[in-house]
């Protein structure tokens, strides 16, 4: 098996994508009798919307589940693959778990923004960078109460650190996730610039998309 063992990478990518496609927000909402987060609130199946629809406990379950979707595939590959395939496999696992969350095959390809899943993947690929990014997210969210701004800040921090401090394949995977996160927050960025972005815990219009 070489670093470019395509059957190996295809298996890793497919399995990771399927794990990422498990929508924690939708499943949590169904189990707790909450409205479908894809159709209620902001329409985004993520922890922020679940917080508005069902409170802190439901949001925490969603957040942890989404984070584990990104973390576990990377850890499995890290423990099962040998050098030099390990890093390439870890990057593929993290990136495709993230893409599975964004476009879940089991839930009509309508997923969330992917912040927690990306955080989990980065924790697995580059633990120190992952911790720094999560601390940056928490600090920004606490200081501003803007979930989207915290996600954008953490994305930039993670991509910058990974580019300069991680192996190239890991840096590339983290940078791709960060770029996609920023693009998917385009509506949030516009609202932030207009001063119309709701803060964490605030209600928002049905048409607004959140993190």
Image (tube, rainbow, N blue to C red):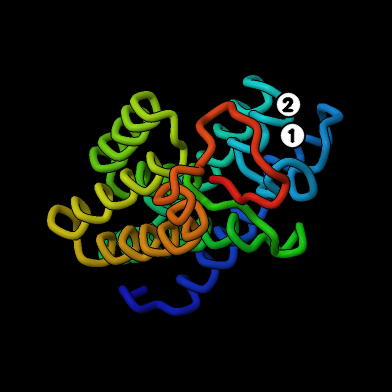
Please state the horizontal and vertical placement of residue 154, each as a whole percent of the image. Answer: 32, 44
The spot of residue 83 in percent (x, y) is 27, 61
**Helix, strand or loop at disc 2?**
helix
Mark 1 / mark 2, whichever is N-terminal: 1
Q: Is residue 192 visible?
A: yes
Q: Quadrant of the C terminus?
A: top right
The residue that label 1 is drawn on is 28
Q: Residue 54: which numbered mark, if any?
A: 2
Residue sitting farthest toward the left: 164
Q: Observer-nearest residue: 19 or 211? A: 211
Mark 1 to mark 2: distance in Å? 10 Å
Mark 2, other Cα within 10 Å: few <14 / some 14–19 / many ≥20: some
State if disc 2 and disc 1 touch (CB < 8 Å).
yes
Instruction: Specify the farthest residue to the right.
Output: 33
**Label 1 neighbour load within 10 Å: few <14, some 14-19, many 20+:** many
Location of residue 142 with respect to 167 vertically, above or below: above
Instruction: Report the number of discs.
Output: 2
Decide if residue 173 is on the left or right side of residue 11: left
* Residue 28 picture quarter: top right
Tell me: 208 left or right of 172. Answer: right
- Above or below residue 114? Residue 3 is below
Residue 126 percent location from the top left of the image: 28, 46
Q: Residue at x 59, y 29 (%)?
A: 202
In depth, the one of 45 and 15 nearer the eye is: 45
Image quarter where the N terminus lies is bottom left
Residue pictured at 76% horizontal, 57% vertical = 107
Between 23 and 191, the one lying in front of the other is: 191
Question: What residue is at 57 percent from the left and 41 percent from the top?
Answer: 66
* Labels 1, 2: front one: 2
């Amino acid at each position: 098996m070489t670093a470019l063992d395509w059957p190996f990478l295809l298996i890793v990518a497919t399995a990771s994508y399927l794990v990422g496609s498990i929508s924690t927000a939708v499943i949590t909402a169904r189990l707790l009798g909450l409205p479908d987060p894809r159709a209620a609130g902001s329409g985004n199946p993520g922890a922020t919307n679940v917080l508005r629809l069902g409170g802190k406990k439901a949001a925490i379950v969603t957040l942890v589940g989404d984070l584990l979707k990104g973390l576990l595939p990377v850890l499995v590959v890290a423990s099962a693959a040998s050098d030099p395939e390990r890093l390439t496999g870890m990057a593929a696992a993290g990136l495709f778990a993230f893409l599975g969350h964004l476009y879940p095959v089991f839930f009509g390809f309508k997923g969330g923004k992917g912040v927690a899943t990306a955080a989990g993947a980065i924790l697995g690929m580059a633990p120190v960078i992952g911790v720094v990014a999560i601390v940056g997210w928490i600090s920004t969210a606490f200081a501003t109460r803007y979930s989207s701004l915290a996600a954008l800040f953490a994305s930039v921090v993670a991509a910058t650190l990974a580019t300069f401090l991680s192996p190239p394949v890991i840096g590339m995977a983290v940078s791709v996730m960060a770029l996609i996160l920023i693009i998917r927050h385009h509506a949030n960025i516009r609202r932030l610039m207009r001063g119309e972005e709701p803060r964490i815990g605030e209600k928002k219009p049905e048409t607004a998309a959140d993190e």
